[in-house]
Image (cartoon, coloured by chain):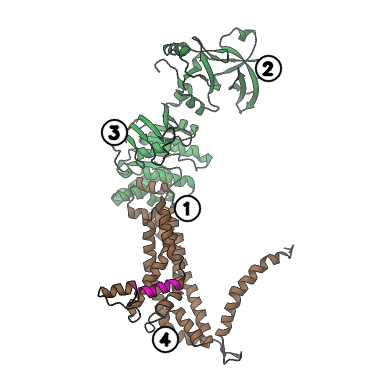
Amino acid sequence: MKVQNNKAWLMVLPMLLLVAVSAIIPLMTVVNYSVQDTFGNNEFFWVGTEWFQEVLASERFHNALQRTLLFSALILAIEIPLGIAIALAMPRRGIAVSFCLVLMALPLLIPWNVVGTIWQVFGRVDIGLLGHGLASLGIDYNYTQNTFDAWVTLIIMDVWHWTSLVVLLCYSGLVSIPEVYYQAARIDGASRWAIFRFIQLPKIKRVLLIAVLLRFMDSFMIYTEPFVVTGGGPGNSTTFLSIDLVQMAVGQFDLGPAAAMSLIYFLIILLLSWVFYTVMTSLDNDAASEQGRH
Amino acid sequence: MASIHLKNLGHRYAASDAGSDNPYALNPLDQVWEDGGAYALLGPSGCGKTTLLNIISGLLRPSEGRVLFDGEDVTDLSTERRNIAQVFQFPVVYDTLTVAENLAFPLRNRGMESTTIEARVAETLTMLGLEGRANERARSLNADDKQKISLGRGLVRTDVRAILFDEPLTVIDPHLKWQLRTELKKIHERFSHTMIYVTHDQTEALTFADKVVVMNAGSILQVGTPEQLFDRPRHTFVGTFIGSPGMNVLRCTFDGEAAVVDGVKLPLDEATITAAHARGLATSGVSLEVGVRPESLLVVGAGVNTDDDPHCVRVDVLGVEDLGRHSLVRLRLGNQLLCALHPEGAAIPEAAALRFDPARTLLYANSLLVEANG
């Protein structure tokens, strides 16, 4: 087909520039660093896949990856069921709806570093309400010294901060279910569980998928809050991939390995998100065709 | 199966504003639905049909009065324990389940044995003509098959006491509507469930039901066979709502022997005149109307023959519309408009007169039919 009007390219140009400057150029810079080494003075020389091999073989990377995976798994295991449960319990009409929605939205409006600071202070044994309260009850709690306490603090903080997101997404799915489905279920004599399993869950499945993906990606990339609260400690016990990466790039100025690690990190997130998406969308099809065979 | 008695039943929604003239969504009524009857509940949108239906099925608790099934008070029973099946305007299927599982759903919820369930489901699938699609996912079906499944979840239960339909054919393709309606009719003939069918479509109501219940503004106006509703509507609303075009309703007075419309006398039959006298309508001053169906009016040429005939009155022809087999003739009598049906092809005389049939010219006082024992 003949191009009628080349001015059309001008329309696309701003977006192309934006994407190039914000995504493509930085990413290519990282790729550039990951395959080269430098001794300063802007002199670079080619090292191929050496940095990648080094990062993948390092115990430091393995440990950080395991910690991050565990953290994300715990976050999903707590926030998704809890979010669904709260969404189911929320009122559907009346002024209570607005009240609940505002209450749910509040934690989401707080900046990450503020959330970190709030919990850092909240948990302190000397002045924090939580830390001091627990200490005065005789419970030995100290997130700066005890690994378990540090993890519990970070997880409760994240649950407090982000469960609302799951709640709001699920709630939006639930309120879009027409009343007639519940009426039909009453006529069919469905139990509370059957209503959830066969009406509510199928209807919120799509938003639930989005909730799972968002919470996975966010928790897998978590940086600010643990950095503010624990600084990765005690020891390395809460040093997640993101914290490790920043230490490597900014603290030690190992640009090559840091760039290689960024790309690996990025690919892991991409891969796991794809796995989640594929599994969750095909689960439904499998379930139905399997039930059909009975 | 059961007879349903709505005893002094009325309903007002809590949220309805107290300032309005009538706080009732459903005015207090007393109505018996006979066991095994096929009823249509006909009325315009928002007249309280769905409210009435939801009260019968127990989705809504009436604010006053009782609901009796076979004399047993079920007002406080849940929908499930009332054993009612209801089909809604929009088909409800359980998306993730197959057709067969959808049908089995109400039985499983009631803890029935799986062998019994299988037999019942197979039987229902045959009844609905869905045998070949038992293992298909319900989501993939089209609207009319989905609606069949909604119906099937009611039919699969052997113990349903009534099946209620809330405008079930709204989303069905027009050419499939008559087909589903015929199937419903067959199912009714075979199993004689008590069926109540809500609709605002008179064709649907008149073809489905043995008895049609006409509602308007929260009240039941008339219960009758389609013929009764057509020939002797007890309320002017019933007359104008049923029929296409509806009944002509003209303001009139009663001079003791005929209805007088803008100075023109229209003949009435003996029974009506006697009843009108018994109620003193000539002098009582209540608002009177005369109702006559376009089908029972005859347009004739005005002349010597008609001028002396007390059944004929002169009218002005305003226009003619072709309706296919009939022409619709728009006429003016005195200062009021009316219409008549005229056979296709027959010429409309320029100087026209209308022949009234006294037996089919009805008198209404305060919108209610004046009849012998009324």
Mark 4 is surrounded, within 10 Å at the Cα level, by few (under 14), some (14 to 19) or many (20 or more) other residues, namely few
Say which residue appears at 31% left-offset and 43% top-offset.
B78
* Residue B80 against residue B198 in the figure, above or below: below
In what element is the residue under mark 1? Answer: helix
Toward the viewer: B73 or A53?
B73
* Residue marked by disc 4: A59
Q: Quadrant of the N terminus of chain A?
A: bottom right
* Residue marked by disc 1: B140
* Residue B231 against residue A249 in the figure, above or below: above
Contact check, label 3 and label 1, Cβ < 8 Å = no
* Residue marked by disc 3: B70
Callout 3, which amino acid?
A: Asp
Q: Chain of mark 4?
A: A
Residue at the extreme front: A127
Asked whether residue B133 is drawn in magenta, I would say no
User: What range is drawn magenta here?
Assistant: A113-128
* Residue B259 against residue A277 in the figure, above or below: above
Asked whether residue A117 is drawn in magenta, I would say yes
| Chain A shade in the render | brown
Residue A169 x %, y %? 45, 60
